[in-house]
């Protein structure tokens, strides 16, 4: 038997369960018709009115011939009152065998106590679900941070702050959908199991589709399918769904994460810049009630307009005005002196981008559109009209982390084929020829953007770890014997 099966509280609760069943209260009941959620009943409270409530018992105060207790559901807390005279001897006796954590349904009359507490006087009650283990107040494991993520349900019970954070996440996602839909964007769904893992440079999760006897991949990005829809005549589309990347865990990375991708035909990166500023500011103000996020040195002001700066200018600010004129050996020495671990195999492009990712990006606390990245890094974007070596893109950085990249999309099928083949090198099987076939039929000029929802919620909630905004983050499985 596991440790929790020997738990002394569990043994007592099992004894209470047997007492309840002997008194005619089965431990696991049926559906219960509620007047409404507890918040609704509180809002519509009428002295002397009647109501049927259901929820989890979170406190029980036994005063002998009467018992006060608190019920909670997903919306609020509500006080209930049991008295032997109004309940009857057997129901009242059974009520005393209830434990904190049990789910019950109650019916009765609403009244206000002398201290002004809205309360329901119980006339009938039923047991809906017996909790065999105690709530977190008596559970030692919640002191362990790892346990908060493994048993998130207990974290949600114990911490109203955590519960509200995830309520806000849900409201933010709903607001994003409503905002985009109101502006004519159509929500679509594209495959999450794909024959080609394309749209980004990342290591995919590999699976096998038995029915077709073929290797498949969990998607790393929906981009190439959404562009197929542009070819098909869907001119304003978005997808809000999961991506999967078989890479490391960190403060800002989870292998399964939520992305919003948006594409608009006949638009460009400037259109995406306006869209993302307005969208994020709207969600911050509507859901969180403020355009300020974070605290202290990492406090952020989300009021538009946001700063815009070229990639090369940021590199020069950090590494010196002559950086792009340095011989490779001298550039490597300077990078090492700045604290960058240099791989001898890197060319100047990769060395420069390592400096951006390790030394520059994390310093961009206020909202910043970093523009004109090297075109060689971004094979799916058009180049700038005045410089074919620079991509017509931005990377939105807030709080020192990338929130949203956006492109003026490349729609030239010949150039796109050349770039993807160059990126694939000797592994030409990685080129998505079906996507290139779609481009041959004519994709309109377009702007496209991805928004990392988990990182955006981190920013708006003012938390530092992605695990704190994902209900069930990825963790290494525990040994069953632990």
Image (cartoon, rainbow, N blue to C red):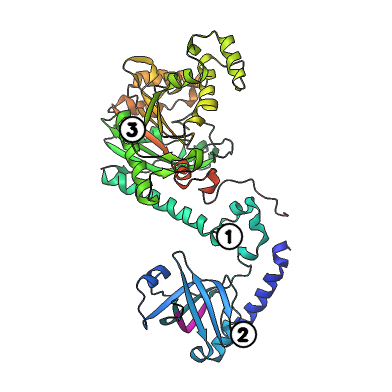
252 horizontally vs 441: left or right: right
Residue located at (48% from left, 33% from top): 197
The range drawn in magenta is 120-127
Residue located at (44% from left, 45% from top): 460
Q: Nearer the viewer, residue 40 or 431?
A: 40
* Mark with earlier residue (2, 3): 2
In whole angstroms, how far apart are the C-alphas of marks 1 and 3? Answer: 40 Å
In this figure, which residue is indicated by the disc labeled 2? 22
Of marks 2 and 1, the one in the foreground: 1
Residue located at (73% from left, 55% from top): 481
- Disc number placed over residue 273 in the picture, else none: 3
Of marks 2 and 3, the one in the foreground: 3
In whole angstroms, how far apart are the C-alphas of marks 2 and 1? Answer: 30 Å
* Mark with earlier residue (1, 3): 1
Please state the horizontal and vertical placement of residue 42, each as a whole percent of the image.
39, 72
Q: Main secondary structure of the magenta part?
A: strand
The image shows residue 145, relative to residue 131, as above or below, that is above
- Disc number placed over residue 154 in the picture, else none: 1
**Neighbourhood count class around disc 2 (C-alpha, 10 Å): few under 14, some 14–19, many 20 upward:** few
In whole angstroms, how far apart are the C-alphas of marks 2 and 3? Answer: 67 Å
Residue located at (57% from left, 88% from top): 65
């Amino acid at each position: 038997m596991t440790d929790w099966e020997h738990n002394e509280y569990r043994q007592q609760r099992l004894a209470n369960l047997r007492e309840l069943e002997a008194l005619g209260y089965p431990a696991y009941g049926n559906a219960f018709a509620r007047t409404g959620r507890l918040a609704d009943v509180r809002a519509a409270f009428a002295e002397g009115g009647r109501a049927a409530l259901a929820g989890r018992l979170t406190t029980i105060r036994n005063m002998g011939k009467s018992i006060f207790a608190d019920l909670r559901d997903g919306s609020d807390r509500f006080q209930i009152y049991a008295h032997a005279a109004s309940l009857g001897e057997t129901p009242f006796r059974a009520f005393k065998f209830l434990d904190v954590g049990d789910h019950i349904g109650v019916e009765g009359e609403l009244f206000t106590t002398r201290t002004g507490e809205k309360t329901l006087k119980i006339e009938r009650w039923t047991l809906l679900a017996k909790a065999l283990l105690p709530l977190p107040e008596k559970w030692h494991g919640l002191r362990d941070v790892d346990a908060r993520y493994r048993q998130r349900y207990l974290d949600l019970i114990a911490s109203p702050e955590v519960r509200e954070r995830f309520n806000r996440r849900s409201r933010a996602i709903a607001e994003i959908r409503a905002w985009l839909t109101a502006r004519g964007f159509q929500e679509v769904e594209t495959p999450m199991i794909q024959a080609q893992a394309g749209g980004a440079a990342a290591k995919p999760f590999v699976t096998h589709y038995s029915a077709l006897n073929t290797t498949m991949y969990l998607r790393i990005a929906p981009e190439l399918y959404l562009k197929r829809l542009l070819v098909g005549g869907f001119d304003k589309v978005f997808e809000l769904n999961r991506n999967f990347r078989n890479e490391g865990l960190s403060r800002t990375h989870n292998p399964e994460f939520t992305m919003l991708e948006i594409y608009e035909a006949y638009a460009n990166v400037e259109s995406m810049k306006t869209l993302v500023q307005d969208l994020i500011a709207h969600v911050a103000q509507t859901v969180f009630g403020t355009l300020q996020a974070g605290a202290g040195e990492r406090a952020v002001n989300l009021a538009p307009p946001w700063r815009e700066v070229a990639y090369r200018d940021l590199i020069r600010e950090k590494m010196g005005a002559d950086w792009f004129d340095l011989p490779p050996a001298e550039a490597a020495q300077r990078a090492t002196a700045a604290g960058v671990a240099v791989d001898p195999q890197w060319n100047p492009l990769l060395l420069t981008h390592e400096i951006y990712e390790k030394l520059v990006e994390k310093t961009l606390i206020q909202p910043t559109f970093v523009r004109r990245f090297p075109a060689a890094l971004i094979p799916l974007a058009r180049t700038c009209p005045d410089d074919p070596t620079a991509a017509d893109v931005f990377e939105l950085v807030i709080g020192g982390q990338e929130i949203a990249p956006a492109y003026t999309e490349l729609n030239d099928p010949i150039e796109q084929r050349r770039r993807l083949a160059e990126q694939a090198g000797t592994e030409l099987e990685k080129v998505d020829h079906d996507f290139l076939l779609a481009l041959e039929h004519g994709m309109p000029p377009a702007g496209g953007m991805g928004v990392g929802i988990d990182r955006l919620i981190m920013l708006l909630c003012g938390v530092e770890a992605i695990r704190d905004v994902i209900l069930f983050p990825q963790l290494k499985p525990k040994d069953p014997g632990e």
